[in-house]
Amino acid sequence: MTIGGSKTSVIEWGTAGAAIEGEIESGDLHVIAPFPDGVLVALVDGLGHGPEAAVAARAAATLLTAHAGETPISLIQRCHEGLRKTRGVVMSVASVNARDSSLTWLGVGNVEGVLLRRDAEPASEAIALRGGVVGYQLPPLRAEVLPIGRGDTLILVTDGIRHDFKMAVTVSQSPQAIADSILARCGKASDDACVVVARYARSPGVSVPVRDESDVVMARKRVRELGYQAGLQEAAVEALATAVTEVGRNIVVYGRGGEIRIVVANEEGHSGIVVIATDRGPGIADLARATEDGYSTGGGLGLGLSSAKRLVDQFDLSSVVGCGTTVTLKKWRR
């Protein structure tokens, strides 16, 4: 039996597995491979069992680990070419991207996958599996991209685990406890078995570079998406989107370009959205006047700040003359 688990900067994870009785080595292997701002989670099942299945699974795991930052489609195609001289594998691959809090996944064969949501709807989503064998016969590949939030839990299982494995899941448990429970309650004695559980640990957030009006439109779109994901009411989402429009336009007009960072946050008992808007402009000398109604200046983020301040629950303005300005907006769920 193999049991293991740990944390990366993006996920907390656990795994459990066992070889079929009579075999020393399992042909089912998990892969956890971090890459910049993300992590690859995969589960590989070498066809059959025994040493040849293990050789095929190890070859796939080596390729996946070495190229973890590539797209799932690229990874499966790479494995397909690299495994032609083996008996082949089936696999499911999930790439977790912390930059935009997304999950891109794809499965070939019968390695099942499910994403259990902590707060969003639908409460669970299943990976779309395509028939085929990596290294032998590859089907047309199409990956699916899903938004994910902090606490969402990904589970991948090989066919040595019964299809009703979700009945063994208590989402309040740690990923390792979930993996142990699934193997103990749903593992089959007739095949190698493996399960890997990964829980997203980052607060969802996105960064939007701001250079022109089209970027302001994109920032407004992303703040709406994350606002609803964070549970804000429609009126609160629209108020925050309007505030983001105000500070975004200031970045374009006065700030010489910059960035808007949007984060789902929990602070001191409050949950909601925090927006951090920065510019590279000349800065603001008089911060108090910059937030007065009717005040306008070409020296940084000035125009629209009084309006933005009224639309949010918390507002902070900081600036260094000659270096730029930062505006922080916070809108909490009620």
Image (tube, helix red, strand yellow):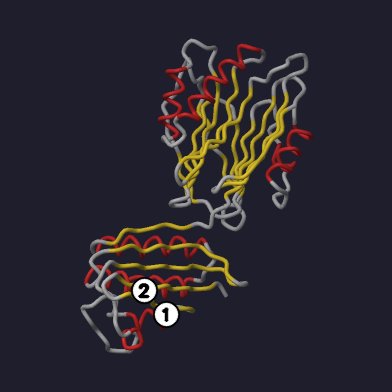
Count of marks overlaid on the render: 2
Residue, disc 2: 242
**Quadrant in the rendering for residue 252:** bottom left
Residue 209's disc is: none
Sort mark 1 into few (<14), some (14-19) or many (20+) by Cα contacts within 10 Å: many
Q: Quarter of the image for the C terminus: give it.
A: bottom right
Sort mark 2 into few (<14), some (14-19) or many (20+) by Cα contacts within 10 Å: some
The structure residue drawn at horizontal position 43% and vertical position 73%, both measured from the top left corner, is 329
Q: Quarter of the image for the N terminus: give it.
A: top right
Query: Please, what secondary structure does the residue beneath circle 1 have?
Result: helix
Circle 2: residue type: Thr
Classify 113 as above or below 158. Answer: below
**Quadrant in the rendering for residue 24:** top right
Distance in Å between CA atoms under marks 1 and 2:
8 Å
The structure residue drawn at horizontal position 27% and vertical position 87%, both measured from the top left corner, is 295
Residue, disc 1: 311
Classify 94 as above or below 61. Answer: below
Classify 105 as above or below 199. Answer: above
Query: Please, what secondary structure does the residue beneath circle 2 have?
Result: helix
Describe residue 250's horizontal placement relative to residue 156 as left or right. left
In this view, the residue in front, 320 or 74, is 320
The structure residue drawn at horizontal position 44% and vertical position 29%, both measured from the top left corner, is 75
The image position of residue 29, as x and y in percent, is 62, 26
In this view, the residue in front, 122 or 7, is 7
Q: Give whichever of discs 1 and 2 has the lower sequence position.
A: 2
Whether residues under marks 1 and 2 lie with C-beta atoms below 8 angstroms apart, the answer is yes
Describe residue 176's horizontal placement relative to residue 311 as left or right. right
The image position of residue 71, as x and y in percent, is 42, 35
Describe residue 179's horizontal placement relative to residue 72 as left or right. right
The image position of residue 217, as x and y in percent, is 30, 63
The image position of residue 176, as x and y in percent, is 70, 42
Circle 1: residue type: Leu
